[in-house]
Structure formats: C-alpha cells, structure tokens
Image (tube, rainbow, N blue to C red):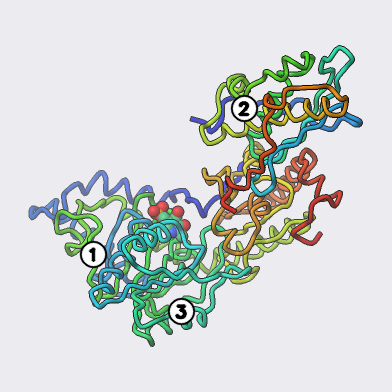
Amino acid sequence: MNIYADNAATTKLSKSVINEMVYYMENVNGNPSSLYETGQKAKEALEDARQRVANILNCEAREIYFTSGGSESDNQAIISAARIGEKKGKKHIISTAFEHHAVLHTLKKLEKEGFEITLLDVHEEGVVTPKQVEDAIRDDTALVTIMYANNEIGTIQPIKEIGEICRKKGVLFHSDAVQAVGHIKVDVQKDNVDMLSVSAHKFHGPKGCGILYAKRNIVLTNIIEGGAQERGKRAGTENIPGIMGMTKALEEAVASIDENAQHIIPLRDKLIDGLNSISYSELNGDRYKRVPATVNFCFEGIEGESLLLLLDDKGIAVSSGSACTSGSLDPSHVLLAIGRPHEVAHGSLRISLGDDITEEEIDYIIKSVKEVVEYLRNMSPFWKDLMSGKRQHVFAE
Amino acid sequence: MALYSEKVMDHFRNPRNVGVIENADGVGEVGNPVCGDIMKIYLKINDDQIIDDVKFETFGCGSAIASSSMATELIKGKPLDEALKLTNKAVTEALDGLPAHKLHCSVLAEEAIKKAVKDYYDKNGIEYDESKFPKDHDCEHCCGV
Ligand SMILES: Cc1ncc(COP(=O)(O)O)c(C=O)c1O
C-alpha cells in the first residue's frame, strides 16, 4: 500500500490544476506589463485571478497581492505592520510560541532592531485564548500575529474573537492561514483580520505561489524591490501559470470543504482512537479544535525519525518533530510550546491525511504504526527503563 | 540523494546484534532521553580477552541504530584491545558515511563500547589508563535545556 499522509508539508497538484497551468504555459506567454495584445491577455488573466481570489476570501481585488508563498506573505505582513507601528512609536508585537518559523524568525529579526516581542503560551491544548491577547495588548502594540491553524498539530485558533479584540483596541491583526485556507472556512471580513497569509501548495496548488491579503488602508513595505507589479508592493514579473493554477486549486478546495470534512473527520477520529490504543501515547493538541486532516501523536520510549523511516518502508509517508528530523539538536518548538518534555517530543509523529483517504488505509496506518512502535520499543533501553520504573513515565498507560 | 547511504539503511532496517546479554561481562550506556538518543552495549568476554558476543539496545534515530549495529559488527570476535581502538571515524566509514549532523551517533557508538569495556575492567579489577576512556559527560548542554 502507498499512502501519502504528509499533506501538511505539501499536497500534490490536482489534474485540473495541472491542466490549467499547462494551458497558460502554452497559450498565455506575454508579460502582463506589456501593452500589446499577448501581454494584455496575461494581464486580464492575472486580474481575473485576483478577483476570483478576492471573492473567495471575501475582500476586494485590490487587497490581494500575489507572492512566492506563505513565507514571503508572512514576512511582508509582519515587516509592514512593524514599519507602520514604529512611525507612531509602537514597537511591541504579540504572537504565539508555536508559529511557523516564517513568522518567528521575522519576529526575531525585529527584536534585534529593538522591537519587543510577546509570545503567548498556547497551553497543552495548543490553543491561545482571546483573553490572553486582550491582556497582552499595550498602548505601544503595533501588531498581533497569530496563526489560523498550526502546521504541526493542526489546532485552530479563535481568530474571529482575537480579531474582534484587535479591532476594538485599534491594533493590526495578521494571521498565517497557510494551514487553514482550503481546509476550513476563512473569510477575512467575518474573521476580523487585517492581513492574511496563504500558500498554494497546501491545497493542491503549485509550490512557490502564495497570497497576501492586506486591508486597503494598510501601506505595505516592499520585501522585493523593483518594478511596479502588485501595485508597486511586490516587484517581479508575475508567475501567471502559478497564479492561475493556485486560483483554480483554491476554488476547488473551497468548493469541497464541507464534503471533504464529512469524509475525513470520521476517518481522522478513527485514526486518533486507533493510535490512542497504543500504551503510553498521547494526541498532541486539542482533540476537537483542529483542522480535519492533521493528527499528531507522541509515543514514549522511541524516536520519531526511526519511526518515520520504518513507516516509509511500509509505504506510508509521514513526518516527525524529533530533533533528528528538524536538523537541529532540539525537537519541534511546537511540541515544546504545548509543554511536551524533550524526551517525549523526540517521539512524535504527524499524520496529515489526503482528501481521498480510505478506511482501509486508516486501518493499515494504525496497524503499521502499532507494529513499528512496538518493534522500536523492543530495542529501546529508554523504553525498558520506563517499564522497569528506573525512569518515570510522562503519559498514563 | 537519499538521506542515508545504502549501508546505513541496511543496518537500520536489519540491525545486527540487537538484544541483551544476561549476566554480561561489561555493559556501557551513553546518551540521554532529553537529547533523543541512548545506546547500551553488552559484552561477553572470554578468558583470552576476546569479545565472544556483543549485543546492543538503542533509542534513537536511523543513524543511531545503524551506528550501533555497525559498531557491534566491527568488534565481535575481536580482542578487547582492538575493540578499544575502534573510532567513530571507522564506524562512519564502514557505513559509507553519515550526514554531518548525524556524526555524533557514531561518537556515541564508540563511547558506548569503551564504557562497556571499562565496566568489564572495573568489575574484574583490571588496571587501565583512565585517560584513554571518554569522560562520563552528561550531554544536557547540547539540547539547550
Ligand atoms: C503555517 C505555515 N506558515 C507558512 C508556511 C510557509 O509556506 P511556503 O512553503 O509557501 O513558504 C507553511 C508551510 O510550510 C506553514 O505550514
């Protein structure tokens, strides 16, 4: 069996998206900035895409900026808010401890410039509360940036309520919605966000394509300087096939949100129950406040990379938050942020299901994870120490 | 390019000498759960100071398991003084290389064997040159805890 269950990392292009992209590669080769017909055809396509994206996110076309992906959108949103804030002497930014590195590293950069960063605790459930945000807002707060859904554990944040507080207090609010858009309903009006980041490759669109929504009164700061594309805020000849493919993918994903959720959620819940039956294991993040497809577990006594590699041998592609997979000495900052101790965070596994997942595949995943966890525990001196009482368990049996 | 060499994957998928030796003559354990790897080596040593049998248990990533497996292969049936000369470099080379950030796995393998030999010397009152053995360091500094 071959199961791709790492859709939070990236998704495969849908056939219709490929067709759309190929059409624009073959037929619309002009530069949208050129005045002759082929250029103007590209321009028309671009502006059509912008309007269609705006319709979906519920904003105006001029509030949509096409970027190279989620990372660029996050960078530009945060830097822009920082520049707007600092002009008014506001140099405080509120975020959470488990944001994507595109956000956290941008905040680190601003911290070096003299900004003060407050990272809110996300608790064991992996959810921040609106009250925490309210309490953290100060007179000099320039921005609140909180992700819509976490990429590792899948928990959804109370974006609408946080947005309401930010509106009331007159503070800009950005949300990294890379893991949300196309999977759950996102509406920039209802959600009270001023800026929103989107990435195409998380909803069966192409890699290297993204969206930044910025409310019309927000003056963006360029990350990329050059030509006057994207209303002068993002230079570079537009990636027309990518943008058209992304727009198509977004429309398809949003149209099937309910249908996908109905199909995936019961299977996801079966997966959670199945993995819960493994002794000394725990689901990471709140069981219910999560996107339909993402499940993340910690297993005591084993290390995630070896788990991942052995599952790969069984045809299952998943990811882990262990230090060995993060390429650093520390395990995932997300798992540490929800209070998992290092030794448990090393034994984590993220499974992010595809829309076409079947019950048979879920059964196979559960069976395979059980087998591999047991196999690795049998050769783990750490596990033996836990079982003999030489070391203390973190989880209940 | 794959993450690991064929050799590493072979030793990871089919680790040699996994298990425990009851009443082992020497046991060495290194690493800690906070850092994400622990290796434990068991030695059976005969009267001629030859390693008759060796087993390992490892908690860790693919290269940690492969390094333990390869290290045990390299010392099985060898005289103790030869096993003591096993370097992490030799383990890495025998595995056709490891990614740079995984080299510490081969270091753990070398240290686990030395520690097991030291345990054997200690148990049998055999004198040895302390400086030839790694210090019992706790590696908590490496995880920023
Ligand atoms: C929450 C989140 N933000 C940002 C990104 C970065 O997006 P991109 O890969 O398009 O730069 C990702 C994807 O890795 C993500 O999951």
| Extreme-left residue of the structure | A35
> Around disc 3, counting alpha carbons within 10 Å, would you say few (fewer than 14), some (14 to 19), or many (20 or more)?
some
Callout 3 amino acid: Ala
**Callout 1 secondary element:** loop
Residue at left offset 83%, top offset 28%: B122
Q: Give me the C-alpha separation between circle 2 and circle 1.
A: 48 Å
Q: Quadrant of residue A210?
A: bottom left
Classify mark 2: residues with Cα within 10 Å, few (<14), some (14-19) or many (20+): many
Q: Which residue is mark 2?
A: B8
Residue A79, position in %: x, y? 30, 64
Q: Is mark 3 within 8 Å of ligand 1?
A: no
Do residues under tags 3 and 2 come within 8 Å of each other at their CB atoms? no
Question: Which of the four quarters of the rendered structure image does ligand 1 lie in?
Answer: bottom left
SS at mark 3?
A: helix
**Residue B74 image-quadrant placement:** top right
Chain of residue at mark 2: B
Q: Chain of mark 3?
A: A
**Chain that bears disc 1:** A
Q: Are marks 2 and 1 on the same chain?
A: no
Kindly identify the amino acid type of the residue bearing the numbered disc 2: Val
Give the mark, 1 or 3, whose residue is nearer the N terminus: 3
- What residue did someone put label 3 on? A136
Q: Residue at x 51, y 63 (%)?
A: A98
The C terminus of chain A appears in which quarter of the rendering?
A: bottom right
Q: How many marks?
A: 3
The answer to whether marks 3 and 2 sit on the same chain is no
Quick one: A370 or A383, which is closer to the camera? Answer: A383
Q: Which residue is mark 1?
A: A221
Q: Residue at x 86, y 49 (%)?
A: A388
